[in-house]
Image (spheres, rainbow, N blue to C red):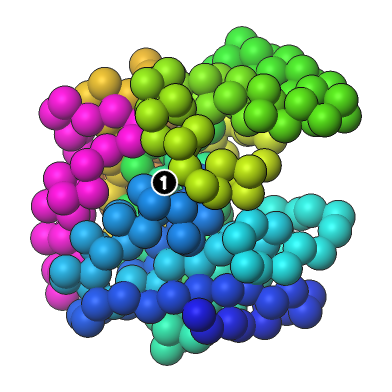
Amino acid sequence: MKTVQSKDGTMLAYDIYGDGPPLLFITGATCFRSFEPVLYDANVFAKQFTVYNFDRRGRGDSDNTLPYDIECELEDIEALIDAAGGEANVYGHSSGAILALEAAVKLENKVKRLVMYDPAYADNAADLKEFKELSQELYKMLALGKHDEALCSFLRGIGTPVEIIDGMFRKSPQWSTMLASHLPPVAKISQLKTPTQIIVGEKSPASMHEVAKQLDKAIPNTVFSILEEQDHMPDPEIVLQAFAPFLQKE
């Protein structure tokens, strides 16, 4: 395990795998670097890249500095990119894709190329309202100590298949460790110069397909890919086949 200090003093834990161009892997909301699916993804990506797999603040072995602010997570990403040599490709999954996009906007000279898989924005005002209602219910569950129930509700709410929740998440020895959505920032990203690939699973929720289309239309320099037979938890081998040629362009 390696560590790096973010701007506000938060210590972030990370591991490095593989050899090749640096790739910062930003996981989704409930994940951390030693969770089996994340670890598997990182090792698959390491077949062609030097993968920086880290615990987002408040997860795994990384510290947590309150109150939470997305700007702090962007500072964390910058600290990891600096540890990788000052420039890196960035791959984000789900809410990690949102952070990856925000980082590309803020750190334009440090994010070489950007890949997003199933970016978890709300696709319209009604969807945003529904997510806010879900958030209120989750806070109530957490206040009552119903952490397991809250996490299951969140995973179902973002479209994670029930069989994945029961068969993968709940059977993980780190289940207890895993204990705000927005519309796509269309105006802000319309000026993004970073080459970007947007990937969505064929079987991912319809809302994520709509978000992907909105992002593809708004960002000037994009490659849009739909992965056949894949859902919100894709096979990393197939994901790697999709983004490796894009990231390895000169």
Q: Is residue 159 left or right of residue 176?
A: left
Regarding mark 1 in the picture, which secondary structure is present there? strand
Residue 27, percent across and down?
47, 52
- Relative vertical location of residue 38 with respect to residue 152 in this rendering, above or below: below
The relative height of residue 239 versus residue 83 in the rendered view (above or below) is above
In the rendered structure, which amino acid carries the disc numbered 1? His
The location of residue 103, given as percent across then percent down, is 53, 61
Residue 141 visible within the image: yes
Instruction: Report the residue marked by disc 1.
Output: 93
Judging depth in this view, the residue of 47 and 195 nearest the camera is 47
User: If the image is split into quadrants, where does the C terminus sit?
Assistant: bottom left
Q: Residue at x 47, y 43 (%)?
A: 172
Residue sitting nearer the eye, 135 or 89? 135
Q: Residue furthest bottom?
A: 85
Coordinates of residue 221 in the picture (x, y in percent): 29, 52
- Which is more toward the observer, 250 or 5? 5
Residue at the image position 66 percent from the left and 29 percent from the top: 148
Q: Which residues are magenta?
A: 225-250
